[in-house]
Amino acid sequence: MRRTALLLIPVLFAAAPALAKPKSKAATALQRAIKLSNDMEDAKALKELQKALAASPTEAEQAQIHLYFGIAYFNLLKPEEAKQSFGKALDLDPALELPESTSPKIKDLFAKLKAGRGKKPDEGKTPPPPTSKPDEGGTITPPPPPPPPPKRSVNWPAWITAGVAVAAGAAGLGLGLAARSSADQAADLTLPWAEAQSHHDSAKGKALGANVCFGIAGAAAIASTVLFVVGSRSKREAPSASLVPLPSGGALVQVSGVRW
């Protein structure tokens, strides 16, 4: 009896490999592909991975096959194919991880793809503008219109004073030319004395009028400049100005409403 037991022990050890479950074709091809990938023979690894995928692998084996497809494609400088393969692998197993020996560049790409799948569809998008909602009666109320742009106020006193300066200057120029013409006529020796004296008096009057106009033009120009400067500094109180002619041909500028 003891001898029979001793004879059964070698028989059992010899039968143990036969009793072990044999690996599937997909698993065998996958192991060969992993070894080729570790040896940096990515082109050969792709062929073995294709064989493994055609051998009806399980879902877990499919995830591993697509994972190594991505590694091989990335090493063969095909990033788009690598992204697609990594995406298929994560679809099959969202918790899938790369081997520790994988290069950092592949890990970065895989981590970005994995993080992107964890986001919500509307996360990171700009919310749409508010739309009109129907009120209780079913009528759609349009959104309020945007506020109108602020109106730019016109510094009318400054512009009016500038116009007065231009008009007075033009009038002074006209009177000056007329005075010169009268003076030339008064200097004509062929004219009678009374007529020459009349031209002389006319020239003096026109010259005086020209001086007055030039004085008003100068004063109005100064007032206009002051009003433009003051108006640009403060618009709370509109300044005003008035001209006071003097008998001597000049004028005074009276400015009110100006804050210095």
Image: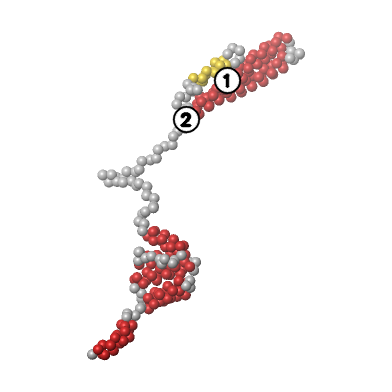
Front position in the image: 68 or 20:
20
Decide if residue 177 is on the left or right side of residue 222. right
Residue at 59 percent of width and 16 percent of height: 250
> Residue 18, percent across and down?
32, 84
Q: Which residue is mark 1?
A: 219
Instruction: Check the image and report above or below for 69 versus 152.
Output: below
Q: In the orientation shown, which residue stands out farthest toward the left? A: 1
Question: For the residue marked with disc 2, what is the amino acid?
Answer: Ser
Residue at 34 percent of width and 71 percent of height: 59
Under circle 2, the secondary element is loop
Decide if residue 138 is on the left or right side of residue 40. left
Can the viewer see residue 43 in this picture?
no
Decide if residue 55 is on the left or right side of residue 221. left
> Residue 65, percent across and down?
40, 71
Q: Which mark is first along the chain, 2 or 1?
A: 2
Mark 1: few/some/many CA within 10 Å (<14, 14-19, 20+) = many
| Residues at marks 1 and 2 touching, judged by CB atoms closer than 8 Å | no
Under circle 1, the secondary element is helix
> Residue 168, percent across and down?
59, 21
